[in-house]
Image (cartoon, coloured by chain):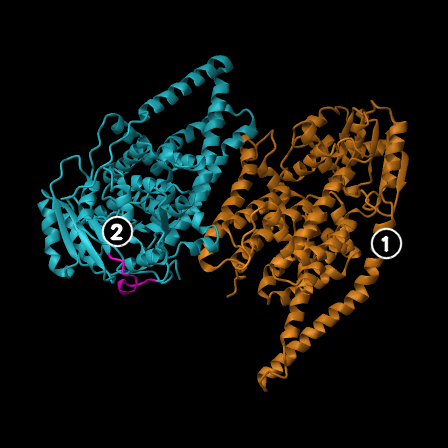
Chain colours: A cyan, B orange
Amino acid sequence: MKQLPVHKKRNHLPGWVLIACSVLVALVILAWLVTVGGFLLAATIFSVVVAAMGSLFSAMELRWRLYTRRSPEAKQEMWFPQPTTFERCHLAFDLLVPAKNEARVIGATLRGMCASTYHGLTVFAALRAGDTATINAARQVLPNCGGRLQIVTREYDEHEKKPAQLNAAFAKGTGDIIGIGDAEDEFHPELINHVAAIFANDSEVGIVQAGVQLVNLDLQAPDGAGWLKRLQVKFQGWWCLHNVLEYYFWFSSRMFYQIRQKVVPLGGNTVFIRRSVIEQLGGWNNLLTEDCDLGIRATLAGVKMVAAYDPRLATREETPHSLTGFFKQRRRWDQGFLEVIRKGDWRKLPTLRQRWMARYILGMPFLQGFYGLLLPFSLLTGLWLNSAVILVMLMFVPLVLLSMTLVLQVIGLREFGREFGQKVRLRHYVFLFAGFYLFQVLLAAAAIDSIRRLLMGQDSWDLTEHHNQHRDTEAVSVFEYAEEGGAA
Amino acid sequence: MSVIPLRPRPDAAPAPTTHFKQVRAWVMTHRVSILVLIPLMAVVVASSLWNFQGYGALTSDDEGTYWSQAWSFTAEGHLSHYTYWYDHPPFGWMQISAYGWLTHGFGRGDIGVMVAREVMAIANIVSGLLLFVLMRRLRFHRVAASAAVLLFVLSPLAIQYHRLVYLDNLEVTWLLAAMVCAVSQKRTIGSAVGAGLCLALATLSKETALVLLPIVFMLIWQNRAKGERSWSLGMFGASYVGLCSFYVLYGTLKGELLAGSGHVSIESAIRWQLFERAGTGSVLDTHSVTFSQLEEWLRYDMWMPVTALLFVPLCLVFRRMRPFAVGYALQVALLTREGYTPQPYIVALLPFAAILVAGGFAELLRVLKSTDIRRAPAGMWRRLQATTALACSVVLLTSLVSFGNKAVPQWTEKLTIVATADLTVEYRETLAWVLKNVPKDARIISDNDFWYDLNRSGYTNVDWLFKVDLDPAVKARYPNGWKDVDYFVARRFAEHQLREQPTTWDVLQHGQQIFTRSNDMLDYDVYRVKK
């Protein structure tokens, strides 16, 4: 079997050296300030710096969250064109679905994908040879798939992860456009028709990123659980809606902002790439976030990328099944981002602006994490200093901007509920407010832990388990849409 | 669709590349409006500056107060020349202060307050321009837009209050800016944020802008499609509250949010303004102060405020006029409550009145023009159309005739005074007399106009008369009450106002009037205390 070459990691200055250096410099400056100017001056400067940083981050956050909502024209730009058919555009699609230990969900996923209304589609389930449960689950649905499904199994060693499975399945297929789906994804049957239209309308387009949306606002209680257990599970799932809203703003706005800024970490699924582009880029690299890496490399190669979003066509996913699962998933992503940062391809981006944007976008989990932890200290220092009122008021600027973000979260939750037919209850709004800061702390903890793991050289793939929370039944679920969708 | 449609993008013309070309393209697109605006703005400027030194008697102590506070902000870094007690948010006189600082205003001219009046002139010129833009954005014809501006700047009532240093004038400018943002044709989130920030600045200039929050909300609601509303209104509200919260934060950080003994606070200031301040009564009570205030306003111009009020029900019918009708009606309705109605309350009603009269007129003309009775099918429908047309014509004719009958004579008389009278000469004479005859180290209590001008001329022991009894820190300087005062220099206040200030009252009782000047509007007195 032909194996695509896997990029070797380039050795730039390791990330930890940079971090250690900046911490050291910060400590020296702090010590100097304390000895020369006294503690008061040091505390003041600390607070002002944190406030300035915070204002910048919060303003950027507002900007990218509102990017596609900034004007009616901007909103129109995110829509898909009119759908097409295979018979008209002659673009064959290969849909790659890499999976590991996903016996519970893979069957329904593959059946759903094969139910696509687009005729030129082949689904490749990229499975690992030892993973018999998943392979059997996939085989079971073979008869229901009308010859559209192919199962690709291969031996992989421990260090070869999702990217290797993708490369293997890619080599098997012959389609013009390669799509990527995750094991639990619920694709809309007409999604491919819409995506094909984008490729057909513009032969320059190399990559299309369509929307993905987590849809469960709560964790699912086990069958037959009593009301107390149900209540408990609901409270345990306080973080779900924050996770859901992250996706909501990411795919309905931030992706478009990134494409405009020409720094695009792609999403892990519902991405569609021309075969020629993958061949030009040399396939997926063996990284934790191969998707993000591919986006950066595609930017460097000058590939034209397009994002499109319509809530009705968004791929539906579920949140991790527990807080621990969420934490591990986030840690894995953060670690993947760190790998991409360390790999340093982004340094070759042509403009200074792009390189700063890359620093910001890739480093955001870390910047935001640290900032989130520093904010209360800076505010307390400000209040405790209580010297110049104007200075203290300046320190509250990021807090005001942050509350504006919170307002966006509230509106986002309401819109999400309408667009995805989810009932948003009072408790969700309570969780939204009560959990806002807690969720930031959680993200910060994941970011810090990912740095620890990177420094200790752990890069195993903690897989997220999936439980079909986003599906109503085992069968290919019926898509229920709210009457007032975004593209109405 | 009811939302104002997006301006279609001109496909033929490619986007201009250089700044010069962009400017040129902009000028070419707006050439007619620019040509209309040149003479129109000349009228606006003339209405603000004609006989600037002469017209507008110094009737209100507020003028000197805001100017002295503006001076204090630049010179001392304080929000007031006495203890700031949250009577109004400080942004209004911060703007005056900035102008004073930029133009070397603290030391220019013989009357300090005149520099603050320059700021009012600028604010009103900007307001006039914004009003034109607002009307155009509401898709009114240039004639209607110009008419609204002319009513807004030429009504003698408007000129009287636009000239004086009132925070309300600054509020109106920011309010109009907020409305212009709210009806932006591009319907961006940025315009909603802009509306929120401008309205917040209006509120921070004068807190009464808070009452008009629902009006700007309505405008944004009307001018956004369904899917855009929640985002636009959310960001409007968030930016408004966000900016305004800094005022509350200031009070909190100073430990002056809640009332307590021994310090001023936002809470006690609000409570005073809303409940404790001696009310002026409802306008419905013909013996109330508010009613006589109303009579005073209508003495300058009867026609515009009354016509606007009569147009309110009519304008409620037309969608684009509805927010303004509601805004005017709301402010008129507030006059009927029992609380305190300040003298410049009318200022925030003026732009609404101008829009209602000019816009309502234009809407009626539009209805009249679009009715074609002959083409209408016979019967009920035709009769209805005929009745509508007749009603429109009657209203249009009546308002035109009443303008000729009522407004023209009253406006002519008042505008002649505006153009020719010198109502500040008495103040100048009094000031000159004091400078010549009163020693620099004399202990003087005065109103705020004189407070600033005397301080600037080297008098070292001048206090604002209201602080002598109300501010404990100032009162401590007068342990023997009226005996510690040598001179009283001020405009003549109403007796009930002075009776509330025991020290000042005693000074007047034990003092001897040694100089006085009067005109139709007010009197100036100088008293020396007999020891």
Rendered location of residue A356, percent (x, y): 42, 34
Task: Give the residue type that dot 1 points to.
Answer: Thr
Q: Viewed as shown, does residue B303 lie left or right of A200?
A: right
Give the residue pinned by disc 2.
A179
Is residue A266 something that shows in the picture?
yes
Q: Are marks 2 and 1 on the same chain?
A: no
Residue at 14% x, 53% y: name it: A150
Q: Quadrant of residue A338?
A: top left
Q: Viewed as shown, does residue B66 lie left or right of B59?
A: left
Is residue A421 something that shows in the picture?
no
Task: Give the residue type that dot 2 points to.
Answer: Gly
Q: Judge whether residue A87 is colored magenta.
A: yes
Residue A292's place in the image compared with B353, above or below, is above
Q: Chain of mark 2?
A: A
Query: Viewer-proximal residue, B323 or B286?
Result: B323
Q: CA distance from mark 2 to mark 1?
A: 80 Å
Rendered location of residue B427, percent (x, y): 85, 38
Give the residue pinned by disc 1.
B416
Residue at disc 2, secondary structure: strand
Q: Main secondary structure of the magenta part?
A: loop
Q: Which residues are magenta?
A: A83-92
Residue A430's place in the image compared with B284, above or below, is above
Give the farthest residue toward the bottom.
Answer: B378
Residue at 29% x, 29% y: name it: A451
Question: Badges 2 and 1: C-beta atoms under 8 Å apart?
Answer: no
Q: Quadrant of residue B14?
A: bottom right
Q: Viewed as shown, does residue A242 lie left or right of B208?
A: left
Neighbours of disc 1 within 10 Å: few (<14), some (14-19), many (20+): few
